[in-house]
Image (spheres, helix red, strand yellow):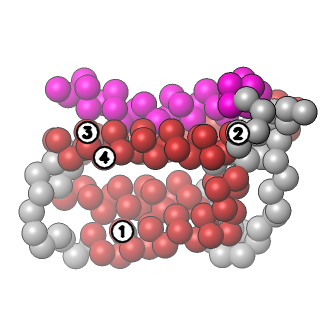
Amino acid sequence: MNVIVCVAVLLPFAFYYCLWTWPQSWVKLCTKGRDPSTAMARISHLLKLIQFVSLLSVSTLSWPPPLYFYPLFIFGQFLNFRVYQLLGEAGTYYGVRFGKSIPWVTEFPFGYIKDPQYVGSILSLLACLHWVPFQYILLWLAGYIFMMWLESKEDPSTRAKPLS
């Protein structure tokens, strides 16, 4: 069971790595007329659901949550919501890598926090430390840190060309 949970926790990061590394292949796979960011979002939501269910299977739920849960979870979700609000689906789901033009955003949290979407997700994940065994949280955090590192060295010449 532990190996299955570990694979489920890491599965989205393998998907994101492939899309980040080979965006043109994803654009071709989506075919003309289908938005690659929307397709990525749908698959990402499914993979996130698998992640959550796998973590839930090894969690020990109890009530009430510890006091640190509230500020971590609320601020983490605020950052995630704010990033989506400012960038939209295309900005959140690798639209730039798929050849889309995304406007430059400088409002909070951009310009204040590096990689605010990942910071928000990490904070929300740390909020659940009371219920989820540490090794699974650490594995998930390693996935986020890997993605932050991968995305920090983006080469514009490797971006996908839109299909005509």
Can residue 124 be seen by looking at this rendering? Answer: yes
Labelled pair 4, 3 in contact (Cβ < 8 Å): yes
Label 3 element class: helix
The magenta stretch spans residue 27: yes
Task: Locate residue 55: give its quadrant.
Answer: top left
Look at label 3 and name its amino acid.
Ser
Q: Residue at x 71, y 43 (%)?
A: 35
Return the residue at label 2.
Answer: 34
The picture places residue 58, in percent across and down from the top left corner, at: 16, 41
Number of numbered tags placed on the structure image: 4
The picture places residue 121, in percent across and down from the top left corner, at 45, 57
Residue at screen point 9% across, 63% down: 62
The label shown at residue 86 is none
- For marks 4 and 1, give the CA distance: 15 Å
Amino acid carrying label 4: it is Phe
- The residues bearing labels 3 and 1 have C-alpha atoms spaced at a distance of 19 Å
CA gap, disc 4 and disc 2: 28 Å
Of labels 3 and 1, the one closer to you: 3
Residue at numbered disc 1:
73
Does residue 155 appear in this view? no
Compared with 44, 108 (above or below) is below
Q: Which residue is mark 4?
A: 52
Q: Earlier in the sequence, mark 4 or mark 2?
A: 2
